[in-house]
């Protein structure tokens, strides 16, 4: 399995092509052995990528070798951080525009950890009071998907610094060494800690899909939810009893809730007509998610003795994003406002441009040889 990217397709030249961070890449692929024969090679930059739910890349290839794609800035565009209240009013943070993704507010509400996609693609921490942005990770490899420990002392994250994408953590104040949390041949990214310190993560599964696992307090890992479908963007309720996640089991991505950690004891469908990136309110009385387009939805939930959910309503609408995968927003500890990633004013406002490349297969075979 190739870690990262979306919309992978096999083409008759013996290559897999896919998009990562707005760049179309190609890798030689042995269709009989079902394995890649080398590293990915960038072919086209600036391919438009949907950033709300599907993460779909806007390109297509004909059987005769023509490539067509929509020009776009892609996910790696400088954006700003904004507070948005429940009426949709915005307050722009003083943080300079950067390629922000995956904001995670610390348990005490004083800081936010983010992936910053420019420079060397690291985890940074913004201090709300001091208005400073401090780099947490320094390895040249990509490091993303931050997750705070319940006590706010450490930040877990994923990295490809030692091969497959794996989970690590580091002291939030930047001191000490980075520690690896698990070993596996499958890629793993952290999602959320339970109140007692268990870590739910995403793993590339045996069915060529993404599954959910859990890292125990003792340091062992166990499968949590593994099917032939994708299960990702998992969040644990504040009381530690419920798991909200996203799955395409119905044919489209929807939000579901199950008991945690005994996920087989029940299941509730939360969204209707599509849903992504669930988030619990700090008091556990609401569940939020995004729908296709630009809407943030909310519904009241009961999580104490058993689980029950009301009807979803729109909180606000707006052009907010931050990347095709992972949760792209967070909520303040008082539950009154949301930290969103604001798209640039120009992004999505101009008419899209279509580029047609004839005989693209010839260019592909020249740049990415696929000799046996």
Image (spheres, rainbow, N blue to C red):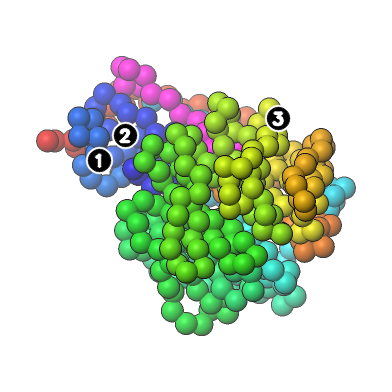
* Residue at position x 20%, y 30% in the image: 32
Q: CA distance from mark 3 to mark 1?
A: 38 Å
Nearest the viewer among 98 and 250 is 250
Q: Position of residue 325 (x, y in %)?
A: 54, 45
| 1 or 2: tag closer to the N-terminus | 2
Q: Is residue 259 magenta?
A: no
Magenta segment boundaries in residue numbering: 48-66
226 with respect to 61 (left or right): right
Residue topped by disc 2 = 16
Q: Position of residue 28 (x, y in %)?
A: 24, 37
> Label 1 neighbourhood size at 10 Å, few (<14), some (14-19), many (20+)?
some
Residue topped by disc 3 = 272
Q: Position of residue 97 (x, y in %)?
A: 63, 59
124 with respect to 345 (left or right): left
Q: Position of residue 69 (x, y in %)?
A: 46, 29
Q: CA distance from mark 2 to mark 3?
A: 33 Å
* Figure check: 206 above or below 219: above
């Amino acid at each position: 399995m190739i870690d990262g990217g979306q919309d992978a397709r096999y083409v008759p030249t013996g290559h897999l092509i896919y998009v990562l961070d707005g760049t179309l890449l190609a890798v030689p692929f042995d269709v009989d052995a079902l394995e890649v024969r080398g590293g990915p090679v960038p072919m086209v930059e600036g391919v438009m990528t949907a950033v709300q739910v599907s993460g779909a890349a806007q390109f297509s290839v004909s059987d005769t070798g023509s490539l067509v794609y929509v020009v776009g800035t892609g996910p790696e565009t400088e954006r700003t951080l904004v507070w948005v209240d429940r009426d949709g009013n915005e307050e722009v943070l003083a943080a300079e525009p950067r390629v922000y993704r995956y904001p995670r507010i610390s348990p005490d509400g004083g800081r936010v950890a983010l992936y910053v996609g420019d420079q060397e693609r690291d985890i940074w921490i913004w201090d709300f009071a001091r208005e400073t942005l401090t780099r947490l990770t320094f390895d040249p490899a990509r490091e993303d998907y931050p997750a705070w420990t319940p006590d706010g002392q450490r930040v877990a994250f994923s990295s490809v610094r030692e091969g497959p994408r794996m989970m690590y953590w580091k002291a939030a104040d930047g001191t000490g060494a980075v520690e690896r949390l698990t070993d596996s041949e499958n890629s793993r990214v952290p999602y959320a800690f339970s109140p007692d310190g268990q870590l739910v993560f995403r793993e590339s599964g045996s069915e060529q899909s993404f599954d959910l696992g859990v890292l125990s307090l003792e340091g062992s890992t166990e499968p949590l939810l593994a099917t032939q479908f994708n299960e990702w963007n998992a969040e644990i309720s504040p009381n530690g009893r419920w798991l909200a996640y996203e799955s395409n089991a119905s044919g489209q991505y929807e939000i579901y809730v199950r008991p945690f950690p005994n996920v087989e004891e029940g299941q509730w469908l939360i969204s209707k007509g599509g849903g992504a990136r669930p988030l619990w309110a700090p008091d556990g009385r609401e569940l939020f998610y995004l729908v296709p387009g630009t809407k943030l939805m909310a519904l009241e939930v009961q999580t104490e003795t058993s689980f029950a959910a009301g009807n979803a309503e729109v909180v606000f609408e707006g052009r907010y994003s931050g990347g095709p995968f992972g949760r792209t927003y967070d909520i303040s500890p008082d539950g009154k406002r949301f930290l969103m990633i604001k798209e640039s004013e120009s992004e999505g406002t101009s008419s899209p441009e279509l580029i047609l490349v004839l005989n693209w297969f010839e260019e592909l075979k020249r740049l990415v040889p696929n000799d046996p």
